[in-house]
Every structure is written in structure tokens, then in C-alpha cells.
Amino acid sequence: MIGFSTDVTELYQLKEKFKQLANIDELTSIYNRRYFFDNANREFNRSKRHQQALAVISLDVDHFKAVNDQYGHPVGDQVLIKIAQLITPTIRAEDIFARIGGEEFSILLPNINRSKGLQTAERLRNLLDKNPIIINNKIKLPIKISLGLSVIKPSDGCFQDLYARSDSALYKAKSQGRNHVYIID
């Protein structure tokens, strides 16, 4: 009897690496836009089906262009990395935190109502406000963010309805002086 044996460990590891590259933002090591929206659509449908709460926070770094212009893109990258490092350990395992693009991030909060969503957004704003980035061991660069919050409504037909409100709320927060949380019901 003749038999063959193949070690598929390397192939499996390569497959897992490709899966990670497809879902993870290379700079911040948090989820990327594609992963966020794929999972957000599934979570939206589940929340609608079971009539459960769902909230979305959109957040954006205030005056990020000025940081890049004054200190350079490597410092801007460090700001984005620091934001991811600060927020990640403070959210629940079931929350989906992603970099949507540039300096914009979103957090999907399953089973979170308006009140808890607002508490979470304010907590994150305060967290970043109290943790400036130290540049070259001497310059303290404050991190200010604006956040928009929305919660699922019975009239929402798809996740994009919910997300569009959080995005509109984000821009409302920016127009009200930045470093604010704004909610659109």
C-alpha cells in the first residue's frame, strides 16, 4: 500500500493571511471599510428581524489636514494609529470598529440604544481629548474628534439609512464648533 501525506499548514496560514489583509486596515490594524459594511448590513438585518437596538457612531479627527500640513504625514499616521489603539480596548467585543477612510472611523454598536450610544460617544470623545500624542518627546499634540450618532428606526429600510444619519450627525457636530457629539434620530 502506498500513501501520500501533504502538510497543508502553510497553505492554511497563507489563506488566513489573505483573509486578514482583505479585512484589516493596514495602517491602524483595525477593521477596514469593506469589513465594516459587510458586517453592518448583516447586523442591521438581524436587528430588524429581532427588533433589537443598533447604533452607529461616525467619528472624524478635527483639523487633521492641519496636522499633516504642519507635522507631516508620518505624524498624521501616528495620530490615526493612536486613535485606534486608544479606542479598541474600550469597546465591547461585539462592536465593530473600522477605519472608513482617511481620518474617518465608524463603530457599529449592536444592542445599544440612544442613551447608551450617547454615553459611548461622549466617553470616546473625552478619552481622546485627555490623551494627546507626544511628538519627538516634547510636543503634545491634542486629539480632538467630532462624532455623529444614529440609532436604528422602524422606518429604516437598510443599513445605509442608519449610516447616512450618523454621517450627517458627524458633519453637524463639525459645523457646531467641532469636538462635539451630535445625534440625529
Image (spheres, grey):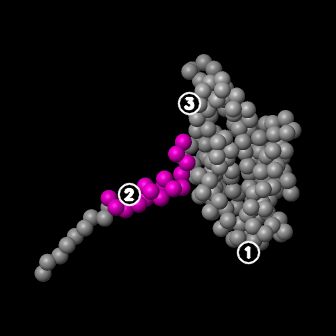
Callout 2: few (<14), some (14-19), or many (20+) C-alpha neighbours within 10 Å? few
Disc 1 vs disc 2: which is toward the camera? 2
Callout 3: few (<14), some (14-19), or many (20+) C-alpha neighbours within 10 Å? few
Establish if 47 lies above or below 31. Answer: below
The N terminus is located in which quarter? bottom left
Label 2: which secondary element: helix
Q: Which residue is mark 2?
A: 14
Q: Which residues, given as a range, are shown in magenta? A: 10-27
Percent across and percent down for residue 70 are 66, 23
Q: Residue at x 56, y 30 (%)?
A: 74
Establish if 151 lies above or below 131. Answer: below
Look at label 3 and name its amino acid: Pro
Q: Is residue 177 visible in this depiction of the protein?
A: yes
Look at label 1 and name its amino acid: Arg
Look at label 2 and name its amino acid: Leu
If you read the primary sequence from the N terminus, does the residue marked by circle 1 or circle 3 appear first? 1
Which secondary structure type mostly characterizes the magenta part of the structure? helix
Q: Which mark is residue 49?
A: 1
Percent across and percent down for residue 51 are 77, 72
The CA span between labels 1 and 3 is 44 Å
Q: Which mark is residue 82?
A: none
Q: Which residue is mark 3?
A: 74
